[in-house]
Amino acid sequence: MSKGYFDGSMPREVLEYYLSHAASAQWLFSSDTLEDDIRVILKTGLKFLGRAAGIWKGDGHDKEHFALARESAEKIHNADPEIILQACIFEVIYREDAEVVKIPAYVFEAFGLPAEDRCFRFDDCLFPKDSGAWSNMPDITKQETQMWFYYRGTRYIDCGYEAFHMGQIHLYCAHDKDLSCISKIIGMLREYGAVHARRHKVLFDAHSHSLVLNGKSQLDYNAMPLTRFPVLDRTGEKIVLVREGKSGGGISPEGVYEKSLPFLYEYDNWGGRDTYAHEHFGFEKLAWSQWWGGDQISWFASQNEKSRNKFLDYTFKWTAVNNPDGFFAFPLMRGIGSGGDGNDSVYRLNNRSDKCPSGFSQEDEAARLLNKGYGYYREFANPSMLDYGGKDVDDPETGVRLPEKVVLYGSFQPYVGARENDSNSEITRMYYIGDGKYSLSFILPYAGEYDVGVSTWGTLSACYCDDGGFPYSGDGGKSKFTVKDDNTVIRITFTYMTGEIKIEFRN
């Protein structure tokens, strides 16, 4: 039986199989290079295609939209029936989309209402004007919004889609303090999917670290864009990634308690390159303005091909090491506005060819990484929980209290998202792993020589650098280490009672 087999339920190991072969495939349903896209999907072994259909502000009638969504889904599933396609229901609604759609009788029936011959009412979906919400943001506590969400979800399920990205869920749930309304709609769509979906189950994610009600997660896994830290001492618009929070736990939709649900990272888009910022901001202000004056995917697309390949490699390793519950959705297809290396408005992973003249040529690198898998780097992974441990722990031989806070500091810190020589940094704080030892893993994107010291209790009063050497006070005397290759995974382990420092490398 295939690792991806499921019908009606999906154990965590099956869910992780799909997330470990995930891509962001925004609006794949309308791609004008679908034949070549399918070739890339099969070559790389992608199994989960996020954002494959949906609308933000629609550009056509629903009849044509869903016909195209169904047609593309059939073509993709003919190529590989195991693939999960994800549709989107976002935190935005427009009058021109809602008020041309007749509400089917089955939607009224699902809400216990008598059928009416009418379209959706845009104004009945919105927050009050003085609420502070966007003018086009639906309020999930409004029944009209709930009907709109349910309608769109059922239509996508009928077209062969088995997953939903629910956008910035905490925004349109602002008045749904007890989560009763969003849990109702997700529950209704799960019930519909149990009968009508291809494999009798649908998955849900949203931009959230946790959406738990009465101990039960409403989402199958959590998802967020990546968080960046600009690098200012290298040529070009360089960025490193920084871990942001943890993936919350709870009782999964499968009924299993999870300390930490799976997590999916992506290169997000929200407006392309900011022309004004690039024309008017100075160097450092531009560096800190979003991702160097643009959204994530437009920044990525604006790098040269070699740099894009390198950053894919870096992101993959970073995800494996910094979040053992995390996975990375490779950018198969994503809107970039004016953020590309030419006049392209869409980033495509495809190698550039006659069949895909707008390809950005990352398919070979993606295939290499997906074929290698996460396991090799997971062996160096930091703990999934952000509890650093070491609380009220005594050395069993001497009874000496071990420090709760131990920090790595030195010249390497700016390349992992911290300030250089910050002995109190939370970014480079080590995890207590037991047996008197502390550990931290990170990725260094640049080869070179670096220095490092170990600050116990997060101060400069008792630091270590030499393996088993004498402690010192102050900012001097740090150990040196050499990184031979870009994107090297490093794990440093420190034993408090002996002062032993162990540095391991993995490429």
Image (spheres, helix red, strand yellow):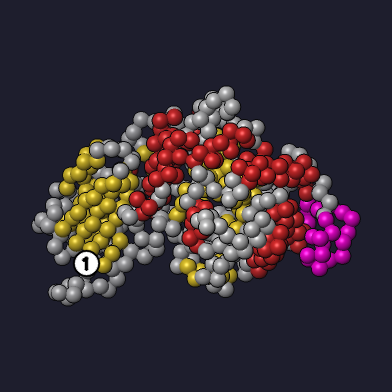
**Please, is residue 28 above or below residue 379 in the view?**
above
120 or 10: which is nearer to us? 10
**Residue shown at 58% from the left, 42% from the top:** 25
Classify residue 39 by image quadrant.
Answer: top right
Kindly identify which residue carries mark 1.
436
Q: Is residue 426 visible?
A: no
**Please, is residue 25 above or below residue 351 in the view?**
below
**Please, is residue 20 above or below residue 462 in the view?**
above
Image: magenta residue range: 104-131
The main secondary structure of the magenta stretch is: loop
Q: Position of residue 297 (x, y in %)?
A: 51, 39
Q: Where is residue 46 in the image (x, y as percent from the top left)?
A: 52, 45
373 or 433: which is nearer to us? 373
Q: In this view, does 327 lie to the left or right of 98?
A: left
**Residue shown at 29% from the left, 71% from the top:** 391
Instruction: Identify which amino acid the numbered label 1 is placed on.
Output: Gly
Q: Position of residue 199 (x, y in %)?
A: 64, 58
Q: Is residue 103 left or right of residue 346?
A: right
Name the residue furthest left: 470
**Residue shown at 68% from the left, 57% from the top:** 197
